[in-house]
Image: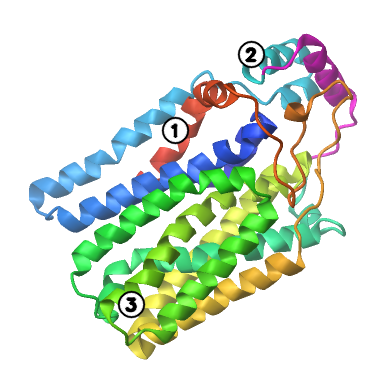
Amino acid sequence: MRRLCRAPPRRSRSPARLRGVLLGSLTVLWTVGYVLANVLGTYIPINGTTAYWLLASGAVPALLVLLRIGIPESPSWLATRGRAAEAARIRRTYLGQSEATATAADAEAAAADQPPAALYRELFTPGQATKTWFGVIFYSAQVLPYFAIYTFMPQILATLQISGADTQNLVLNLALLLGGVIGLWPVQRLGRRPFTIGTFAILTLCLAAMAVLSDASSGALMVPFLIYTFVMAGASTITQVYPAELFPTALRGSGVGFLNGTSRVASAIGTFVLPVSLSHFGAGWSMGWMALVLLFGTVVSLAWPGRRRPVTPSPPRSCTTDDRDGPPLGAAPPHTRRGGHSCALLRLLPDIFLCLPSWAS
């Protein structure tokens, strides 16, 4: 459940110029925990004592949730609840907005008519349904092969008859970690849609190559597998950025939660079907049907653009680009001011650490 609700509040208080990096960093930190758990589980022998220590290690990142104490609320939300002074203080302190800009933004938010509580059926109303289904398909198509492959990586390596499976498993996990870190740069500098389409295309080609080369040598198979692992780790950062930008403020929490929930269903299906597929049809056919899943995600990303402009109300004219909801998804974000990245990261670092307990639980 933590994973279902963590993107909307971070998006609400993240500067637009850093939103891609800050939201994407949640996935990177999750990947750090995933890789660490995978490596430790592979190389540490399980016995009576070790099992208890491995179980207890999950409490360490869980304790980091205490760092969230004191994290401010979304200023827009505070303004709509009549807490304008608190909202203005948060805008000045954490978002670097001027007094005039903060006051104008909060006055506009407070003056806006507040709609009734959003219902899930509003996600499928005309004008919003396409964005919702696009989010469901792109998110599910990406995570289905991701979780299936890396949950059963040792079995896949054995089925492909790759020598030195433990060493190759370690190399692939390191590529997963490196790809996640490097993927933060293109998700911020490129448009969301070009990044999504490009990574889908590369991932599709890699799995298709593995399907064709399933009987080839270990070296030939590891090349597309490494590329797939590296690109997939980078591509997964978009799953914390894109969904939050597909919905207006009133629907954002429900929309992101719905997309995360449906993607978990897809990942569960993948982890159930893949071992059956490996045992009955072999690695080649298994890589083939997962390549088709990614191809479907590529086609949908090309056909349905998601959104072409911000979906939340425009800010007052006194606002700068940094205060707005963000650039169109198909366009690169504006250039950042020097020195802004480090300050914003330090302010939001405790909130980012919230994602760490998710891999431990």
In the image, what residue type sits under mark 1? Phe
Residue 51 at what x, y percent from top left?
16, 49
Front position in the image: 256 or 331? 331
Residue 114: within the magenta? yes
Q: CA distance from mark 2 to mark 1?
A: 20 Å
Residue 188 at what x, y percent from top left?
61, 43
Q: CA distance from mark 1 to mark 3?
A: 39 Å
Residue 223 at what x, y percent from top left?
36, 70
Q: Is residue 271 left or right of residue 88?
A: left
Q: Which mark is residue 93?
A: 2
- Label 1 with label 3: CB-CB less than 8 Å: no
Q: Quadrant of residue 18?
A: top right
Specify which label sits upstream in the sequence, 2 or 3.
2
Residue positioned 41% across, 71% down in the render:
224
Residue 157: within the magenta? no
Q: What span is in magenta?
A: 96-117
Residue 9 visible, this angle: no
Q: Residues within 10 Å of mark 3 (few under 14, many from 20)?
A: some
- Comparing labels 2 and 3, the label whose residue is closer to the camera: 3
Q: Which residue is mark 1?
A: 353
Residue 297 at what x, y percent from top left?
62, 69
Residue positioned 27% across, 69% down in the render:
154
Q: Which residue is mark 3?
A: 220
- Asked if 324 appears above or below 38 in the picture, the reply is above
- Label 2 with label 1: CB-CB less than 8 Å: no
- Label 3 sits on a secondary structure element that is helix
Q: Is residue 137 left or right of residue 56?
A: right
Specify which label sits upstream in the sequence, 2 or 1.
2
Residue positioned 85% across, 17% down in the render:
104
